[in-house]
Amino acid sequence: MHTTLLTTLSLALSTSALVLPRQQSPQTISNAGGAPPNVPPPTNISSSAIADFQGVNFLENLESAFFAAGLANLTSSEWYHHDHDHDLAIQIVTKVQAQELIHVQTAENILNHFKDKTFTPCEYVFPVTTAEEFFALANIITSVGIGAVINVASSLALTDPNLVPGPASILAIEARHDAFFRAAAHVSPIPNPAPFDTRISAAYALNLAMPFIVPGSCKGGMPSFPIIPALKQTSGASPLTGSSGPITFSFDASQVKTDASSTYYIGWVNQANVVNYTPATVSNGNVASTIPNGLAGLAFAALTNQSTALDVNTLTGVTLAGPAPVQIS
Ligand SMILES: *[C@@H]1O[C@H](CO)[C@@H](O)[C@H](O)[C@H]1NC(C)=O
Ligand SMILES: *[C@@H]1O[C@H](CO)[C@@H](O)[C@H](O)[C@H]1NC(C)=O
Ligand SMILES: *[C@@H]1O[C@H](CO)[C@@H](O)[C@H](O)[C@H]1NC(C)=O
């Protein structure tokens, strides 16, 4: 009896050890202001929801590593200077980083519960050398994360409606992070440039994350997604382009075949609207187009050879290069 109990106990322990989530430290929970939701897990889950939470797991790993590195820099002797704004930024980024870790654990808890694959962090490089550049990239990374989580919530609403509240309440917190970074990076002191944030596809978010991931460093694997050649904005007032006016982009012409006889467009993804198309002139990896009227906040621009795809997920399948984040206002 005793032996059986012990065997059962050790079996139970080893089974649970297999699926034990990465628990966050009491310090992280305290910095974040709370732990992952303690509501019971759902009784079943769709395969698309699994893919959604795996995407969240993978992207939030990147975000938490980015903020951990930024926080180390903000507090380092190189970046640190004693003034009210800098001290406040350290306080805020400490919370941001801890909250990203809690979001990672929230996604992993669901995946572990259903014994699905989770993703360990990769190695990352972030092209920033000053606090202002860190805040500016934080604004872009946070906006990409928000766009991806809107897509997750939209997809869960169709397949797993009882799982919508988690991502929905993550969105409101990420929006507060972004409002701080917009101001700290001097993009704009206005936290609310548009009535809607912009949904992007999982493939867009993952492609936008790629430049920050050291090739071959994802020992725990990566979600599978279509690789789309990058599109880079090469003109436009910095940091804000305004709505309307000319804009140029570039892409690697060896990766994307274009020809003089075809018609090209920039597809603009912004707020909750259908994709807006402007004609594009393409030659040798250079693209000239115009910013349509009526965009605001951060838009995502994609090079394409059609103008009929109405939503971002359809546009993703016919994107030749992109998307490029374009800060309109
Ligand atoms: C969960 O199971 C119930 C009952 O079988 C079913 O109606 C529901 O669609 C399932 N939900 C998901 C997300 O698969
Ligand atoms: C931190 O600072 C180092 C050294 O300047 C830099 O290489 C790195 O990109 C910075 N990372 C972040 C996220 O600020
Ligand atoms: C658009 O580009 C794709 C990929 O290069 C190509 O297969 C397709 O035929 C093109 N469509 C048009 C209308 O040019």
Image (cartoon, helix red, strand yellow):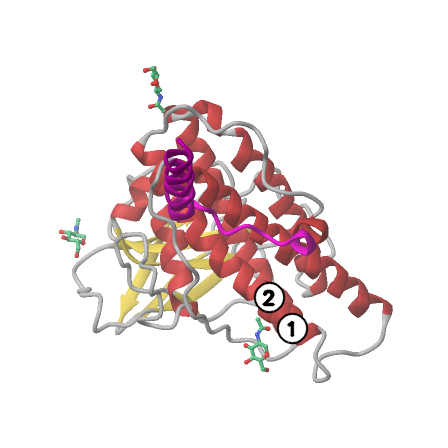
* Residue linked to disc 1: 72
Query: Does the image show residue 5?
Result: yes
Please give left or right for residue 135 compared with residue 204 in the image. right
The residue stretch that appears in magenta: 1-28
Q: Is mark 2 within 8 Å of ligand 2?
A: no
Three-letter amino acid code at the position of disc 1 = Ala
Q: Element under label 2? A: helix
Query: Does the image show residue 269?
Result: no
Q: Ligand 1, what quadrant?
A: top left
Q: Residue at x 31, y 47 (%)?
A: 316
Most frequent secondary structure within the magenta stretch: helix
Q: Could you tell me how far apart the alpha carbons at marks 2 and 1 are, in whole angstroms?
A: 6 Å
Q: Quadrant of the C terminus?
A: bottom right
Please give left or right for residue 43 compared with residue 321 in the image. right
Three-letter amino acid code at the position of disc 2 = Ala
Q: Residue at x 50, y 29 (%)?
A: 164
Membership of 171 in magenta stretch: no
Which circle marks residue 68 in the picture? Answer: 2
Membership of 4 in magenta stretch: yes
